Image (spheres, rainbow, N blue to C red):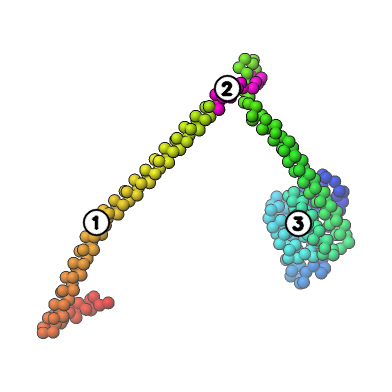
Amino acid sequence: MAQPQEQKLNSNIKWQAALSKIEKIEDTPAGAFTSQREAERALSIYNRALDHINSGNEDIARIALEKLVATYPLFTDAAILYGLCLGADRKYKDAELQFKKALLTDPDPADVEILKHLQAQACHCKNKDEEEERSRRRNEKKLLPVRASLAQAGILERAAGSADGDEVRMASAKERDDLMRQISQANKGSSASSAYGSRNKTVQIISIVIIIAALLFFLTHFLIAPAITRANDRNSRLKWLEEKLIEGAETDEAFQVILDDYQRSFSE
């Protein structure tokens, strides 16, 4: 894999362009795998990852390559390809770490030069991004007092007399006081509306609870209680009838026949 070695250290390295130059491989390096089956499997994953990269599915390729380099750390081609994917995704810190890990596996001399070069590129891009972020934060910090001054100094409005409406002037103290008064009144109205809404919600909840309690009382008093009473009365009658059958069966065979049929029909 000699393509990335041709890139020179600069702040404009095209990670995606470097990726596009990587080609599929047919043979795996000796000593990277414990069996031929493992080598064939790793080679298949590597080449499929390249297909995903070329078809715009870099996310899938990164997931596959991350697992591949974790399983086979001596597979230098996969380590380089994964590092390039991280660089193309602007994850320069992760890319630098990946190239550094690959260098610790004692790769071939040709791969050592490539890995050192890519590690330096990733470090360079990482430092540049960090400096740009620090610069952005410094600029935002400098703008904070200006924004605060503008917020306190007043409200800009278009001058009514300007011909094109582009001129602006600072609102007067009276206009600012009037605006603040309107805002205060609006806030009070909003608070009152919020309090009224809260009371209204409480009333609604209480009403719902009362309705539910009334329904439960109706169901218990008019439906459930009468049903229980009828069931108890029916059980008492059946018990009385069963006792009479047992008494009659002692002296009359007809009662005994009825009792036997009863027991067969309603036996537990």
For residue 11, side relative to residue 208 (left or right): right
- Of labels 1 and 3, earlier in sequence is 3
Separation of disc 1 and disc 3 at Cα? 75 Å
Residues at circles 2 and 3 in contact by the CB criterion of under 8 Å: no
The tag earlier along the polypeptide, 2 or 3, is: 3
Q: Is residue 113 magenta?
A: no
Q: Which mark is residue 212?
A: none
Is label 3 in a helix, a strand or a loop?
A: helix
Between 253 and 28, which is closer to the camera in this rendering?
253
Disc 1 residue type? His
Q: Position of residue 27 (x, y in %)?
A: 80, 64
* Viewport quadrant of the C terminus: bottom left
Task: Please provide percent x and percent y for residue 219.
Answer: 27, 55
Residue shown at 42% from the left, 37% from the top: 196
Above-or-below relation of 128 to 222: above
Rendered image quadrant of residue 74 = bottom right
Residue 221 numbered tag: 1
> Is the C-beta separation of discs 1 and 3 under 8 Å?
no
Which kind of residue does numbered mark 2 sit on? Glu
Q: Label 1 near label 2: C-beta < 8 Å? A: no
Within 10 Å of disc 1 (Cα), the crowding (few <14, some 14-19, many 20+) is: few
Residue position marked by numbered label 3 in the rendering: 82
Q: Is residue 22 above or below residue 32?
A: above
Which residue is pictured at 81% across the width and 58% down the height?
A: 100
Q: Is residue 86 visible?
A: yes
User: Magenta residues?
Assistant: 165-180
Disc 3 marks which amino acid? Tyr
Q: Nearer the viewer, mark 2 or mark 3?
A: 2
Q: Is residue 262 toward the left or the right of residue 152 in the image?
A: left
